[in-house]
Image (tube, coloured by chain):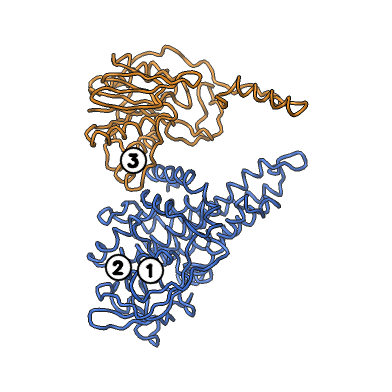
Chain colours: A blue, B orange
Amino acid sequence: MDFELSQDHKVLRDSVREFVEKEIKPIAMKIDEEHMIPDSLVNKMAEMGFLGSYFPEEYDGAGLDMLSYAIVVEEVSKACGSSGVLISAHTSLACGPIYTFGTEAQKKKWLPALNTGKVIGCFLLTEPDAGSDAGAISTTYRREGDEFVINGSKIFITNGGYRGTGVLFATSDKSLKHRGVSAFIIDLNSPGVEILKNENKLGIRGSYTTAFALDGVRIPAENLLGQEGQGFKIAMDTLNGGRIGIASQALGIAEGAFERALAYSKERKQFDHPICELQAVQFKLADMYTRIETSKLMTYKAACLKDAKKNYTAESAMCKMLASEAATYVTKEAIQIHGGYGFICDYEVERMFRDAKITEIYEGTNEVQRVVISKMLLA
Amino acid sequence: MKILVCIKQVPDMESRFRPNGDKTWYDESDLAFRMNEYDEYAVEQAVQLKEQLGGEPEITVLSIGPERTVEAIKKALAMGGDRAVHIRDDRYYQKDPWQIASMIASYAKGEGFDLIFTGMQSQDRGSAQVGVIVAELLGIACATTLVGFSYDGGTITAKRELEGGIKGVAKLKLPALVTCQLGLNTPRYPTLPNIMKAKKKEIASLTPAELSGEAELTATAAIYPPAKKGGGLVLEGEIGIQVDRLMGILKEKTAVLR
């Protein structure tokens, strides 16, 4: 058993790190303040191949693996959680299901533009009355000739504001519960798609979180993803992989806060000594680092299992849970180590604290993760 | 056109440096490694020249060092190198610039390179000798510390950095070797698709014994951290006088005001 990254993964990590240091870190605070990731950064990330990391080269992906993708999201999130989730939602939730469940024609049609970042992808599952209970969605579809007609609304859609390509879930008959759900590929510029608003949020403020109204939106029949009635399975499978992305985002946020707290504890002097000489601070650092390393091991393990085409359902739930709880813990303690300065925006750990919280909630709350893990145990 | 770029993997300058057991090199156990910064300028310039010439030149990347050196080689290939030669040598740090240059020249001799790029110096040993010795051994033209490079019809126009901020311009006919300085260019980031492509590029492996049996001319007697000075220099007195003294020190001892 070898816990070292391969040489190829190290080259990738160092290259991404270099890019993040120069291109993202200096503007992370601005992204949070202005509630927007500049197009120039989205374009640069696309040129770097961050938006198609683990999809084959024949669909204009980079052709790398899931572990590479996890490393990209982690490194980007060290500097900016908003940019991290842009990559994660785009890759895992939009490209992912099209690649896994799409026909060859669908993959050829939609993936190249997504993988090269020409359009940004999103995942339209959540509704005002259907969050953790995803089988309860009430957005409907009905067949009319060679089209499907969609009516309903979607909320909390990460990346929705880009109006790119979405993977949309709708039901033919709500009384069928999850058995009535189907998945569609939707161009969000289609007539009838209306953006109601982009939400104002506690954290990841640079990331769009969009509410949509869908009013008689016509989707060509060829855009049905998988079979009719297979939508719930597609959604669950997709979120399964997505959790590795969110774990990586949370891990990166935790590491970013930890790096700052560690450096600050060496610089900050009180009682004539750097505060890192105080055992009270040392214990915090030890606890923070231990949670980070534990999360990293589980996240990389889940990614490696997926790469090896083995079952990774429990591991992806565990890494998402571990890493998100590490992120809220570590960012909170990072502020504490900074004292009053940590509460000031200039020191950035307060932003990381705000960014961390959502990772315990989205792509399955941590309560849902615990359900997934215990189901595996009791099956 | 055949281009050779010589690179070295060096410790990340933010690492904690300590002498090793026999005090002839750094203790490598705590170090992170990366491509020597000046060599990144060399790789970038080679790739820019390849692009200028419509992709015709073939770029070979060469590095000497242990197994981990492959990481630096792969980065250079992901930046645009076509193939690589790794001279596997775990004892690289015991070799002096003459021995290193002799190995490179011995390899390059049979290959007929038109143009060789190296960094101006390595960030760890910092001898700044390897490039010029290679040029001498191959009997080709050489210009050092390039901050500007252009190529047209077999002639290189090299802008060089001289003392006191003065620049010089040298013209060289191929074959030639140039060493690259900070400011020459901005190295590109390896993109994910190019990292993937680099995996398929050839990395040939050679041993030092196949290349050169030259003995060392200079042996490292010892490396050691400087004795700790107490607290540095503290300027005191009226603020205007402090500013004047600080300006004087910055002008005299540093390049920041030039």
Q: Are the numbered discs 2 and 1 placed on the same chain, yes or no?
A: yes
Determine the residue located farthest toward the front in the rendered image: B240
> Marks 1/3: CA distance?
33 Å
Relative to the observer, which residue lies in front, A54 or B93? A54
> Which quadrant is the C terminus of chain A positioned in?
bottom left
Residue under numbered circle 1: A237
Between disc 2 and disc 1, whose residue precedes? 2
> Marks 2/1: CA distance?
10 Å
Residue A201 placement (x, y as % from top left): 55, 66
Q: Which disc is residue A101 wearing?
A: 2
> Marks 3/2: CA distance?
32 Å
Relative to the observer, which residue lies in front, A369 or B114? B114
Label 1 CA crowd tier, 10 Å (few <14, some 14–19, many 20+): some
**For the residues carrying marks 1 and 3, which lies nearer the camera in this image?**
3
Q: Is residue A76 left or right of residue B77?
A: right
Residue under numbered circle 3: B78
